[in-house]
Image (cartoon, rainbow, N blue to C red):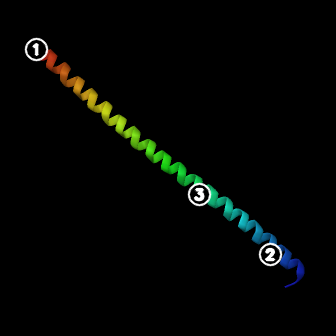
Amino acid sequence: MKEPDLGGLEQKIDRLITLCARLQQENQSLQERESNLLKERSKLLEKNELARSRVESMIARLKGLSNE
């Protein structure tokens, strides 16, 4: 290979290394975000279930009061 070709190849390799490092960081960030969102979803589902249970309990008590 000629000298100028080696310089261009070296620049391309450097850009690929930089891109690869950036993509690895982005991937790590997205994985952390996904993990946090899954935890948040789980907590919200728990709260929703608790609220549903409380509402059903209140409805049952109100029905019981109206039957008296």
Image point (31%, 33%), residue name: 50
Residue type for callout 2: Leu
Badge 1: how crowded within 10 Å, few (<14), some, or many (20+)? few
Task: For the C terminus, give its image quadrant.
Answer: top left
Q: Which of marks 3 and 2 is in front?
A: 3
Vertically, is 68 above or below 45? above
Residue type for callout 3: Asn
Image point (14%, 20%), residue name: 64
Image point (81%, 70%), residue name: 11
Which residue in the protein does label 3 denote? Answer: 27
Is 48 left, or right, of 10 in this rendering?
left
- Residue farthest to the right? 3
**Residue 9 circle label:** 2
Vertically, is 4 above or below 55? below
**Residue 68 circle label:** 1
Task: For the N terminus, give its image quadrant.
Answer: bottom right
What whole-number distance in Å separates the C-alpha atoms at marks 2 and 1?
Answer: 88 Å
Secondary structure beneath disc 3? helix
In the rendered image, residue 35, in percent from the top left (x then y), is placed at: 48, 50
Q: Quadrant of residue 4?
A: bottom right
**Sequence-first disc among 2 and 1:** 2
Vertically, is 14 above or below 4? above
What whole-number distance in Å separates the C-alpha atoms at marks 3 and 1?
Answer: 62 Å
